[in-house]
Amino acid sequence: MKRSLIDILDLSVAELDELIASACDIIDNPAKYAHVCAGKKLATLFFEPSTRTRLSFEAAMYELGGNVLGFAGAQSSSAAKGESVADTAKTVSCYADIIAMRHPKEGAALVAANNASIPVINAGDGGHCHPTQTLADLLTIYREKGGFDNLTIGLCGDLKFGRTVHSLIGAMSRYKGIRFVLISPAELRVPDYVKEDVLDKKGIPYEEVTDLETAIPELDILYMTRVQRERFFNEEDYLRLKDSYILDLKKLTHAKNDLCVMHPLPRVNEISVAVDNDPRACYFKQVLNGKYMRMALILKLLKEAGTI
Ligand code: NCD
């Protein structure tokens, strides 16, 4: 049966476990997977800029022996002529076996999924969610921490527009003993719908603070994020808020020795490059883990659709 991934909560905890096990098997036995998608095509429909997400989807499909087609900007597609997402999804269903789509509008991936006859993977819909970044994040946490329970997770930066944050909160809220420290300027706090529908509903303890330095000592994970310039209504606010938090080696001296520093990237100024050589820096491991999880996801969805 055709199945899409729009929100990370579309996957059960058991399915996440399966995806992680599948990604670990891919890491250990790449040759076993080198031809499983032979003759199949992934379409990457990116209406917004991307480096990691699009290229990791493409690398994932190539490493599974499949092929890739697509576009990397709204201007080079018929969207520039006024074509709807629904029509684009119907069209691409005639050419490909699975779609990965990124779009600036919240809900666009759902519209595509409702109109496509092939699985659609949400590669980011506006400021809403980004489930495959969360898959990368989960494999990273699993490999660094050995599991998901009893973690104090600091999320820092633009928690309002940062879609990776919304998806990660949803995913981590299903494990035991999780506590969030939400570190942001007042204007960039986690949206109410995330607090009400996820944190409050599940009774997850969280606190909202503005200071990174005082929060850092208690954290097991520190997830830094970029201030999402493209979602701001005016440049002035962006300029005022963009450098609210900069993680440097001095701040890290107060952190646990086994802190896991994460960032979905791209980094602008949020983490000083000097931190890259600290063993606690995990953000480039996240990049690699993202490719393996996307391989596992493509396999799962193509199998469920009966394509492979
Ligand atoms: C993130 C995104 O697109 O939401 N990037 C990514 O996919 N790794 C984070 C960001 O752009 O800040």
Image (cartoon, rainbow, N blue to C red):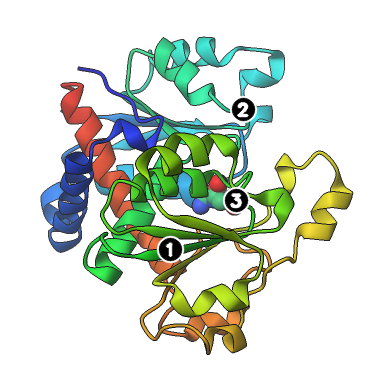
Q: Specify whether 291 is left or right of 299.
A: right
Where residue 192 appears, x then y in whole percent? 58, 38
Sequence-wise, which precedes: disc 2 or disc 1? 2
Q: Which amino acid, by three-letter code, is at mark 2? A: Lys
Q: Name the residue under label 3.
A: 159
User: SS of the residue at dot 3?
Assistant: loop
Q: Specify whether 233 is left or right of 66.
A: right
Where residue 266 appears, x then y in whole percent? 59, 58
Q: Is residue 31 visible?
A: yes
Residue at screen point 39% across, 72% down: 220
Residue at screen point 15% across, 21% down: 306
Residue at screen point 39% across, 66% down: 152
Q: Mark 1 points at which residue?
A: 153
Q: Are marks 2 and 1 in contact (CB under 8 Å)?
A: no
Q: Is mark 3 within 8 Å of ligand 1?
A: no
Q: Which amino acid, by three-letter code, is at mark 1? A: Ile
User: SS of the residue at dot 2?
Assistant: loop
Q: In this view, does 50 lie above or below 260?
A: above
Sequence-wise, which precedes: disc 1 or disc 3? 1
Q: In which quarter of the image is residue 251?
A: bottom right
Quadrant in the picture for the N terminus:
top left
Q: Which amino acid, by three-letter code, is at mark 3? A: Leu
The residues bearing labels 3 and 2 have C-alpha atoms spaced at a distance of 18 Å
